[in-house]
Amino acid sequence: MRPPLHQPTSLDEACRLLDTLEDPMVYGGGTAIQILIKQGVLFAGNFVDLSRVPGLDAIEETGEGLRVGPMATVRRMERTEIVRCRVPLAAETYGHVANPRVRNTASVGGNIAHGDYRLDPPTALLVLDARVELTSVRGTRTVPIREFFVDFQLTAVEPGELITGILIPAAASGSTSAYVKMSSLGKNDWPAASVAALLDPERRTLRLGLGALAPVPRYVEVALDGGGVDEAVKTALSAVEPELDPIPDIRGSADYKRGLGMVAAEDAVRRAWEDAR
Amino acid sequence: MTQTTPFATGAGTGVGSSRSRVGAEGKVRGQLRHVADRPAGGAAHVAVHRSTRPHARIVAIDVSQAAEFEGVDAVVTGADLHAVFGDRMFTGPAFSDQPPLAVDRVRYVGEPVAAVLARDVATAREAAELVYVEYEDLEPVYDVDEALEGRAFVHDRLKPSIVFGDLRHLSGKSETNVAYEYNLRLGDAVTAGSQAAETTAHEFVAPPVHHVPIELPATVAWVEAGRLELFTTTQTPSYVRQAAADMLGLPLSHVRVRVAPLGGSFGSKMYDRLEPLMAALAWTQKREVRIVASREEAFMLTTRHGAKVISSMSTDAEGNIVAATADVRYDTGAFADVGPRITGKSGMIAVGPYRIPNVSITSRCIFTNKPSAGPFRGFGVPQVTWSHESLVDELARSRGEDPVAFRRRNLLREGDEGYMGTVIHSADFVGCLDAVTEAIGWDTPLEPGDRRWRRGRGVAVGIKAVLTPTVANAVLQLNQDGSATLMISTVDMGQGSDTIMPQIVAEVLGVDAEQIRVVAPDTDVTPYDTITAGSRSTYHTGNAVRGVSERMRERILDLAATHTGSRREDLKLDSGAVLNTATGKRYAISELVHEHFGARGATLTEEYNFTTSWQPYDKTTGRSPKVTEHWFAGAAAAQLLVDRKTGRVHVEHLAVAGDVGRAINPALVEQQLRGGGIMGLGHALFDELVFDQGQVLNGTLLDYQVPSVKDMPDRLTPIVVQNPHATGPFGAKGVGETGIIPIAPAVANAVRDAVGVRITRLPLSPERVLQAMNEAGVEE
C-alpha cells in the first residue's frame, strides 16, 4: 500500500509530523519519489508534503548571494533573473536538469535530498560553497554542501529533519564559470560525466564540482600559479584524476566514464577560462 | 489492371493533396479515446505474476495468499487454463507455441505464470506478488551461438501452426533450437568468391530493441450472450478474432474484436500479445476483465529480433560484385511468433539490392530464453541491411572507389531479375541513392573538421518486399446526402490510413474527403483484412478502396441514367454531381439517391476485394519468380561529426529517400520518412535492450533510450521519389518502413569516412566508437 500523505500548513507542524510519524519522508515535487514508488523500491511509512507550508518556495537575495527555499522549482532557478545575475553558474546548471516538464515540478530541496550521484545542481553548489539549512523540532543547523553528500544516495539529513533553505554565496565579481554535461546515450539522458568549473577573477583558484563520476558528487580545488590555460588544465586534471571512481553501468564502463570525466573537466576549465576574456 | 481514373483531384482533397491528418487535434488535446480510456465500470482488473527464471520447470505454484488477499476475485494459472482449453490454449501466427500463462515450464524472465483478478489495479498488482512459484532450473540458452551448440533446448518439440502449409515439415521436430531455416543458392558463391579480385568479410551484430510506442498495450474482454467481445490495442483485429475463436472453440461470428485509434505501435501490438490471456480469462471467469500494461511490462511483451550476420561480398577487377554470402541468425526468443516469416522474407534479400550472379544465404530463426521477438518496423530487414550496406561500403573502399559510384554500378534496375528470382519494378534504387547524395552535397568537397571533431559522409541503400500474399476488403456506403462511410479493417496507428483512404474515395467520386468517414475496425462490421503491417495497406487496402469507389461511381451513373433518361455514356461524376456532357445538365448525387429510394438518409452499399498471391520459394534454391507483390526502395545519406575524445557522434545532416510509387498524401509520406529516419538514428546510436543472463537490464524509460528532440540531426531532409507502380492505387505503394531500413549503415559508413574505423556491432555508442579509434590508433 502507498504511504499516507500528510499535508501540514506550517513549518512547525511539518517538523512535528517528521518527529512523530513512523518512517516519514518529505514529499517535495515528487519527481524522484514517483519513480521510486513505480519501481517498488521506496521504503517510507508516511509522506509529509510541503506544498501547503507557506514561504518555502521563496528565492531571496541576501547580502552574500541567495537564499533559496526548498520548494522553489528547478525551473525557477533556471529562469529567475536574480539567480541568473547573482549566481549564473547555478542558473546554467539547474537549466540542465532533465527536461522542462521535470524542471517545472521538481523542487530544489528534493533534488539534493534525493542524493543521486548523477544530479546536475550539486556540481555547481559545491564550487559555489553553498550551505544547506536543516530544521527539525530540535532546532535549525547549517551543513556545508561539501559535507552534505555522505555516501551513495546518503546525505547529511538526519531523521526528523527537513531542508528549509539552500544558501548560495555569489561568486566574486569577475569570476567566470562553466558547466559541462556529457551523456553517453541519448542527449536527454542522465550524464555519464559532468563538471562545473569556477575560476576566480585573478585566476588563482580553480574550483571543480564533479557529477556522476563517483558514488557521491565530488569537489576539487586547485591553486593556479599564473600560467596559461594549458597549465591550468594540466593542474586541474592531475587533481581530478584521483577523485574519479565511476560506477559502471549500461551507460559505460568505469574506464570509459573516467576518460569522459577527464574530457568534461578539460572542457569545463577551458570554457571557464574563455569566459574570462 | 489499368488505370481508369484520371489524376484530377476532387475538391482539392483527392490523391496528391497534403490534407491534414484526421484526428490530429484530438490527439494533441488528449480528446481521442484510446482503448484504455474506456471506463472500467465493474471490470476485474488483471495483473500478471511473471517468471523470475530464464528457463525452468514449474514444480508448484502456491496461489493461496494471493487468492485470500482483500479485494482479489480470482487467481488463474496456466494449469487452470489447460484444464479448460487443452492444447488449444497455445497460439501464435507461425507456430502454436505461446501459452497465455506458462504451463509446466517457463522460457524467459518475465513470462506470465499466473493472473490475478481484483477490484482495482493496485490490489491486483500487490496480490500478483504474493504468488509463489517453486522452480527447478533448466539449462538456459542466452544467445544464438549457444542455441546452435545444441546443449539445451528451449522447446522439446516444434509446433508449427496449421495456418502455414510450408511449415508443416517442421512438425514434431526435436533436439533443435532452429525454428525455421531458409536457404538461397544461386550459382557458386564459394568458388566465385575465392577467384574474385577483392573480398570483404565481417560478422555483424544488431541487438534486440524495443518499439516504445507512446500508448501502452491494453485489452478489455467480456462475454455477452455467449459471444466474446474484445476491445484491444492491435494492428491485427482479423487475426485476433481467428485466434480467439480457435482457442475458445467458437464460430467467428461469436468473437468480436474492436480497435480504437492506436497511439503508435511499430509492430509491437500484433498477433498474440495480451489478447489470448484476456479472452481466456473473460471466458472462464465469465466477467469483464481489463488490463493496461505498465511501461515495464510492455518491454516484456515483444522485442525486435536481435541478429548476427556472418557475411562476405566479392568483386572482380572491374568492380562488379560477383559473389555474396550471408549466414543470418535471428534471435526469436522463447516463442516463434512471426520469426519464421521474418527469417525467410528478410533472408532472401540479405545481400542487398544488387546484381549478384553467385549468392549463398542461410537464414535461421533461433529460439533462446529471452522475451519473444516479433514484428518491428522493417520486419527483420534493417538487421541484414546493417550487414550488406557495411560490406558493400568496405568493398568499395578497399578498391579505392567512391562508395556511391560502386553501388550505382551494381544496383538492381527496373526489369532486372533479382538473385531471389523476382523481377524489380517501381523500385528506383539508383534514383533514391542519387537523391540523398545530392541532398547532402556528396560531390562537394568535405571540410574534414579539426583535431577533435572529424567530419565524414556515408550512404546506404535498402530493399524490402511487401508482405505477400494478403487479402484486403472494403465496403463503401454512400449516404443520401453525398457523404460516405468507408468500412475497412486497416488500423490507424499514426501512419495516417484514416486520412489517405478517404482521399482515394474522393479522387474517384469527385467528392470532398472531409465528407468521408472511416469506421474504426470492428470485426462485426468491417470486413476481413490480413493485417495492418509490412507497409501493405496503401497498396492492398488502397486498391480495395479504389475498387469499391469505382463500383460506386458506376452505380451512381447507372442510377442517374435510369432516373434522368440520359444516355449512360454521356454521364460523368463532377464535384458531387452527375454531369451530362451532352446537355450540360447537372444532377446532385443527393437528389438522385433521394429520388431512387424515396427516402432521406438512405444508403447505397458496394464492396470490393483485393487479394495478392505469391509463389512459394523453390525448396532447393530458395528462389521464386514471384516472391512478393512489389518492392520498396530507399536510401539514406548522413554527414556527421565524430568526437575523437569521447567517441560521440553528432549528425549534421540526414537525408532519407523512398520510392513510394506515387504519394497519395505527400506531407504524410514525408512524415513517415522522417519518423523512420529518427527511429533508425536511435538504433544506430544508442537504442538497445541490454540483457544479462536472460534478464533485461534497462527495461524502463529511465534507462532505455529513444531519441529525444535534442538528438535530432541539425538537418533532416525527406525526399519522396515517385515511380508509379503499374497496379498500385493511382500508382501508390506504402512507405511505413522504407525510411528506417538504411539508417544505421549510413551512419556507420559516415563514421568510417570520418575516422577510418569500421564498426560492426550496433549501436555505435560513444564508448564503442572511442574504443575502435583507440585500437586503430586514430591520432588525437
Image (cartoon, coloured by chain):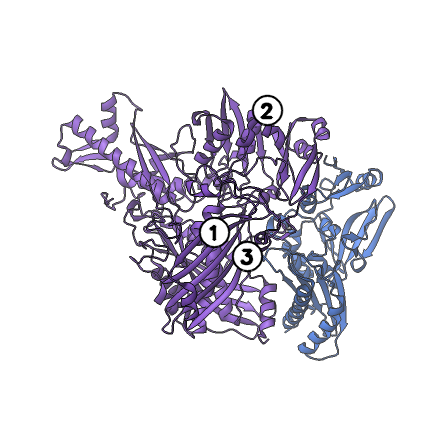
Q: Amino acid at mark 1?
A: Gly
**B675 left or right, relative to B618:** right
How far apart marks 3 and 1 lie (CA) works out to 28 Å
Label number found at residue A99: none
Question: Which residue is identified by label 3?
Answer: B710
Residue B449 in the figure: left or right of residue B697 = left
Left or right: residue B11 compared with residue B325: left
For mark 1, what is the residue? B380
Give how far across and how far down residue A200 sits, in percent.
72, 70
Q: Colour of chain A?
A: blue
Specify which label sits upstream in the sequence, 3 or 1: 1
Please give the name of the residue rendered at 69% of the width and 61% of the height, measured from the top-left corner.
A87
Q: Which mark is residue B285?
A: 2
Quadrant location of residue A234? bottom right
Looking at the image, how many numbered discs can be counted on the residues? 3
The chain displayed purple equals B
Q: CA distance from mark 2 to mark 3?
A: 48 Å
Q: Residues within 10 Å of mark 3 (few under 14, many from 20)?
A: few
Separation of residues labelled 2 and 1 (CA atoms): 38 Å
Question: What kind of element bears circle 3?
Answer: helix
Q: Nearer the viewer, mark 3 or mark 1?
A: 1
The numbered mark, 2 or 3, whose residue comes first in the sequence reads 2
